[in-house]
Image (cartoon, grey):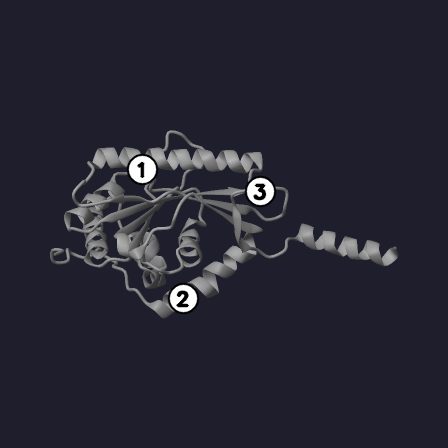
């Protein structure tokens, strides 16, 4: 049985299904639709299952849009089959506290004691019931996509250890993102959904080993995604979201209509 809940972070999650839905459909999805020409997705394996253990989705962190990206993944890829949570810097969460409705809770990375409380809190949340998920950016801050080596903080490995210690299995899912302009007014977003790794309480990895593995997996998936996009090799991708028509496309459509009219 999971132990008693640890001390809460300064700002715990305050899940609200209606608030969650409103934020996604009135703020996040319309913004993605307005600012991106297309969102593409590639699946490298089967999606995780809620009854197979707690889910940790870990992503690279390269743009301001990444928070919106986690909601897009939750709704459009995972199909809202998980009860999802996410870490957010305390200073930012105080300004945008409504994100607690979507499962956001505070973390203060520069304060070791507060960071430890946040890790214990989410570990208990994940272990207390199957079908819960955590979205994480283990790089900790926004960095260029092609910067190497890719540095990962050990927090994700510590959460995995703590969840396993409470008797719950863990599913690890890497998702990498790349933002690109490809000859249109608006950029395109490319997502690579990696393969699920399942860990059980009988085989807990060490923190250093798992941290290194997460870094290596993110790096490999980022490199593969970059190579596919640069080569224009989109045969394994599907359009997840089609955005609003840009000025260039509107102008071309008007020009075609005018040309046909004159012909």
At 56% across and 34% down in the image, what residue appears? 231
Q: Earlier in the sequence, mark 3 or mark 1?
A: 3
Helix, strand or loop status at disc 2: helix
Q: Give the image location of residue 250, x and y in percent.
A: 69, 55
Residue 151 appears in view: no
Judging by the rendered image, the residue that carries numbered circle 3 is 181
Q: Quadrant where the N terminus lies?
A: bottom left
Residue 21's tag is 2
Task: Answer above or below: position of 153 versus 100.
Answer: above
Q: For the view shown, which residue lies furthest in the right direction?
A: 263
Q: Mark 3 vs mark 1: give the one in front.
A: 1
Q: Earlier in the sequence, mark 2 or mark 1?
A: 2
Helix, strand or loop status at disc 1: helix
Find out whether the residues at labels 2 and 1 contact each other: C-beta distance under 8 Å: no
Find out whether the residues at labels 3 and 1 contact each other: C-beta distance under 8 Å: no
| 45 relative position to 186: left or right | left
Q: Give the image location of residue 82, x and y in percent.
A: 32, 58
Judging by the rendered image, the residue that carries numbered circle 1 is 214
Q: Quadrant where the C terminus lies?
A: bottom right
Instruction: Return the residue nearer the eye: 167 or 63.
Output: 167
Task: Answer above or below: position of 47 versus 219.
Answer: below
Q: Quadrant of residue 210?
A: top left
């Amino acid at each position: 049985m999971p132990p008693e809940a640890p001390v809460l972070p300064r700002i715990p999650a305050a899940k609200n299904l209606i608030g969650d839905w409103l934020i996604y459909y009135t703020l996040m999805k319309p913004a993605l639709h307005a600012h991106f020409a297309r969102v593409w997705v590639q699946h490298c394996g089967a999606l995780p299952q809620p009854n197979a253990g707690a889910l940790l989705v870990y992503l690279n962190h390269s743009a301001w849009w990444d928070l919106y990206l986690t909601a897009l993944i939750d709704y459009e890829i995972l199909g809202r089959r998980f009860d999802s949570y996410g870490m957010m810097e305390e200073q930012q969460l105080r300004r945008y506290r409504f994100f607690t409705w979507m499962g956001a809770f505070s973390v203060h990375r520069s304060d070791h004691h507060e960071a430890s409380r946040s890790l214990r809190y989410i570990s208990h949340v994940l272990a207390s019931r199957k079908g819960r998920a955590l979205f994480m950016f283990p790089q900790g801050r926004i960095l260029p996509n092609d910067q190497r080596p890719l540095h990962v903080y050990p927090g994700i490995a510590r959460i995995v250890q703590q969840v396993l210690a409470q008797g719950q299995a863990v599913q690890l899912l890497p998702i990498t993102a790349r933002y690109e302009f490809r000859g249109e007014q608006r950029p395109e977003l490319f997502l690579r959904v990696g393969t699920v790794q399942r860990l059980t309480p009988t085989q807990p990895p060490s923190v250093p080993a798992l941290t290194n593995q997460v870094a290596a997996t993110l790096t490999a998936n980022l490199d593969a995604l970059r190579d596919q996009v640069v080569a224009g090799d989109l045969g394994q991708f599907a359009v997840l979201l089609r955005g609003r028509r840009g000025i260039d496309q509107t102008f071309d459509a008007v020009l075609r209509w005018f040309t046909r009219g004159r012909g």
